[in-house]
């Protein structure tokens, strides 16, 4: 919250400050980090909040302002605050062990940095599992210039997945039994249904394949049994935003979850997406969108009728939902949709139709990841919609302990969405364009045949990354200096996650040179979706729109896909780069990035090269 004792003096001197060339408005804010009791409507638990509040604290800044934020730690352990998506000096980034030491119990740490951007962002602890236990809030930055869209009301809609277990207990349980929280495991009745529909041999073969991989087609969410919240209110507590019919309402969606992706819709209303991760995009009107962990989307809706509308945020695995209401008056509500059928992972989500992967390193790294007996994966495989995929024998491909015979994967294959794929040899697909599959799917950022391809509940428009076009390019459109490949790897059975088969504690930093433009190639070799977050610098998502590629701070990488992003290396210092799924980052899917050189050190000569 803004310090009231300083506010009057700041406003008094505002005109003098604005008149001074090169000066900026200076604001001071105070945050305390406190133990609180969280009440989700389904359970209560001890948690962490800011300024003694269980509701997310909202910090409001103005572009061009210089801020001072005093953070006082009232906990009995160290804490920190990371300003997610803000461009600032690395010493102010708030990551213990990388940018500073952390904030000890009873101490106050003062952050100071300029506000050089506008839009919707958020902040959270980067210490242990304090964020999943409630240590998060919202940031709204007003722009200096007029925004390219109009609205009459403005609400933050901050989502999270509150769990009755604390973060440390969840991590212990996942390490002990990775499917500990999987409440959608397939049963004998599911097997009998598959046998009736596809035949006993096909059902047995499919069960055998998943058993060999020590995985399940329902491994979409590591964590279930949570209660989704909107602004700290559970579905029965019904957070409500009031409007007058005909008003344009801006909803700032922030996904502060530890592990959960949400599919969001407001039955009866179209949503016009105007910002992604705080940056203006060319407006696109949709019926539904998927928000990855740590992403933000700003949408504008215009309810014209004198009635209530339900904000429905359904977890990607269809295990739970958050619910809020837009209404002309407090106390109103609207019908709440039923959860849709749960999606099922397919062999495409396991990378079976995926080029881009360095298979020689998959399955025989230091973690012994993903052992498979592919000799048992011959014959036909029936996908969830009944599509039969022939010739999935993998006997001859050199993948260390994962030999595959891709000569049997040629010809054409019809996928569940109707896509016809030709030549399913892993070595024959051209991924050089922008990370989409060689075949066209209903969403190019999902593998052809993926069980996770989203679709709107009413058959309308579902937002794709491919729809995002920058309102105004932030950087000159130029060729990357070099490419760095980051394979997203892991071992679900041992619950170890990594990059290029190496956990954070065993990895060397990624070294970049100030002034270069780096192209990152994400190759997802796991069956989980990973939201990758680079601190301190923007991530330009390569979605085929060239100079109008959207600028983000989180890039989501679905199973079995290759996704590219580029970064203008313009922030000296040491930064974090990690999967934003809390338990994946803690298990090793994390890197330190060191940017060498800077405005005062131009000795480095940039050369074009490619790193693997």
Image (spheres, rainbow, N blue to C red):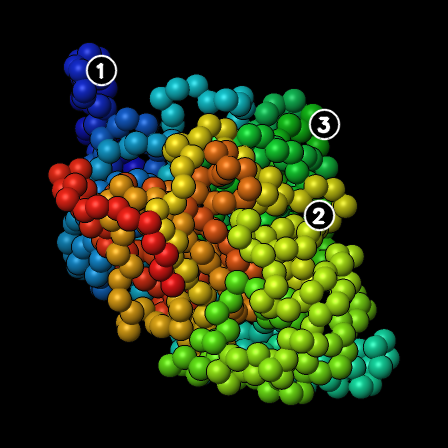
Q: Residue at x 39, y 32 (%)?
A: 476
Cβ–Cβ under 8 Å for marks 1 and 2 = no
Q: Which of 234 and 558 is in front in this view?
A: 558
Residue 244, above or below 558: above
In the image, 189: left or right of 548?
Answer: right
Q: In terms of depth relative to the viewer, which is nearer, 172 or 489?
A: 489
Q: Nearer the viewer, residue 51 or 132?
A: 132
Task: Name the residue located 50 percent from the left edge and 34 percent from the top edge.
Answer: 548
Label 3 Cα crowd, 10 Å radius (few <14 / some 14-19 / many 20+): few
| Residue at image mark 3 | 305
Residue at the (69%, 73%) spot, across then down:
409
Mark 1: which secondary structure?
helix
Say whether disc 1 or disc 2 marks the residue closer to the N-terminus.
Answer: 1
Q: Quadrant of the N terminus?
A: top left
Give the labeled residue for mark 1: 18
Report the Cα–Cα distance between label 1 and label 2: 48 Å
Residue 53, placed above or below residue 592? above
Examine the rendering and report whether any part of residue 110 can be seen: no
At horizontal 75% and vertical 67% (from top left) the residue drawn is 411
Q: Earlier in the sequence, mark 1 or mark 3?
A: 1
Dot 2 lies on which element? loop
Q: Is residue 76 something that shows in the picture?
A: yes
The answer to whether marks 3 and 2 mark residues whose Cβ atoms lie closer than 8 Å is no
Q: Residue 456 carries which label?
A: 2
**Real-space Cα separation, disc 1 to disc 3, in angstroms:** 44 Å
Q: Earlier in the sequence, mark 3 or mark 2?
A: 3
């Amino acid at each position: 919250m803004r310090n009231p004792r300083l506010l009057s003096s700041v406003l008094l001197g505002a005109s003098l400050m604005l008149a001074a060339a090169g000066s900026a408005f200076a604001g001071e804010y105070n945050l305390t980090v406190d133990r609180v009791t969280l009440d989700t409507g389904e359970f209560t638990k001890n948690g962490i909040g800011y300024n003694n509040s269980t509701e997310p604290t909202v910090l409001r800044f103005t572009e061009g302002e210089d801020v001072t934020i005093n953070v006082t730690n009232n906990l009995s352990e160290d804490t920190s605050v990371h300003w997610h998506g803000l461009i600032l000096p690395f010493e102010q980034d708030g990551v213990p062990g990388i940018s500073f030491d952390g904030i000890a119990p009873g101490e106050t740490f003062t952050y100071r940095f300029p506000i050089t951007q506008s839009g919707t962002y958020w902040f959270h602890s980067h210490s242990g599992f304090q964020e999943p236990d409630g240590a998060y809030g919202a940031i709204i930055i007003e722009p200096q210039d007029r925004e390219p869209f109009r609205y009459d009301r403005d609400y933050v809609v901050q989502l999270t997945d509150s769990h009755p277990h604390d973060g440390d207990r969840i991590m212990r349980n996942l390490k002990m039994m990775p499917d500990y929280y999987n409440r959608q495991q397939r049963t004998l009745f599911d097997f009998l249904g598959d046998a009736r529909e596809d035949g006993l041999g096909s059902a047995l073969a499919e069960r055998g394949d998943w058993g060999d991989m020590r995985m399940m087609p329902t491994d979409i969410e590591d964590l279930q049994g949570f209660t989704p919240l909107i602004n700290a209110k559970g579905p029965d507590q019904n957070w409500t935003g009031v409007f007058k019919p005909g008003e344009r309402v801006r909803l700032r969606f922030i996904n502060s979850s530890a592990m959960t992706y949400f599919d969001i819709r407001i039955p009866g209303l179209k949503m016009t997406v105007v910002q992604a991760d705080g940056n203006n995009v060319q407006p696109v009107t949709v019926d539904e969108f998927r928000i990855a962990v740590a992403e933000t989307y700003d949408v504008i809706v215009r309810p014209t009728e004198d009635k209530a509308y339900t904000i429905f945020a359904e977890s990607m695995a269809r295990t739970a939902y958050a619910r809020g209401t837009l209404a002309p008056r407090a106390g109103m509500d609207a019908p709440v949709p039923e959860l849709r059928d749960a999606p099922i992972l397919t062999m495409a989500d396991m990378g079976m139709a995926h080029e881009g992967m360095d298979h020689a390193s998959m399955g025989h790294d230091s973690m012994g990841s993903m052992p498979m007996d592919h000799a048992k994966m011959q014959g036909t495989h029936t996908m969830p919609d009944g599509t039969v995929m022939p010739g999935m024998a993998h006997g001859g491909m050199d993948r260390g302990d994962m030999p595959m015979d891709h000569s049997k994967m040629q010809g054409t294959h019809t996928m569940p969405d109707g896509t016809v794929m030709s030549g399913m040899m892993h070595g024959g697909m051209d991924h050089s364009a922008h990370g989409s599959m060689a075949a066209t799917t209903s969403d190019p950022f999902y593998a052809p045949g993926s069980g996770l391809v989203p679709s709107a509940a009413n058959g309308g428009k579902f937002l794709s990354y491919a729809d995002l076009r920058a309102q105004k390019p932030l950087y000159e459109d130029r060729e990357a200096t070099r490419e760095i490949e980051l394979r997203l790897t892991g071992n679900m059975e041992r619950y170890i996650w990594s990059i290029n088969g190496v956990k954070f504690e065993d990895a060397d930093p990624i070294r970049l040179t100030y002034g270069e433009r780096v192209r990152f190639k994400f190759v997802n070799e796991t069956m989980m979706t990973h939201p990758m977050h680079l601190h301190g610098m923007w991530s330009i998502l390569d979605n085929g729109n060239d100079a109008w590629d959207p600028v983000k701070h989180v890039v989501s990488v679905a199973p079995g896909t290759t996704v590219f992003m580029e970064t203008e290396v313009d922030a000296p210092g040491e930064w974090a780069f990690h999967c934003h799924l809390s338990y994946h980052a803690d298990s090793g899917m994390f890197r330190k990035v060191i940017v060498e050189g800077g405005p005062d050190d131009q000795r480095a000569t940039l050369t074009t090269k490619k790193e693997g």
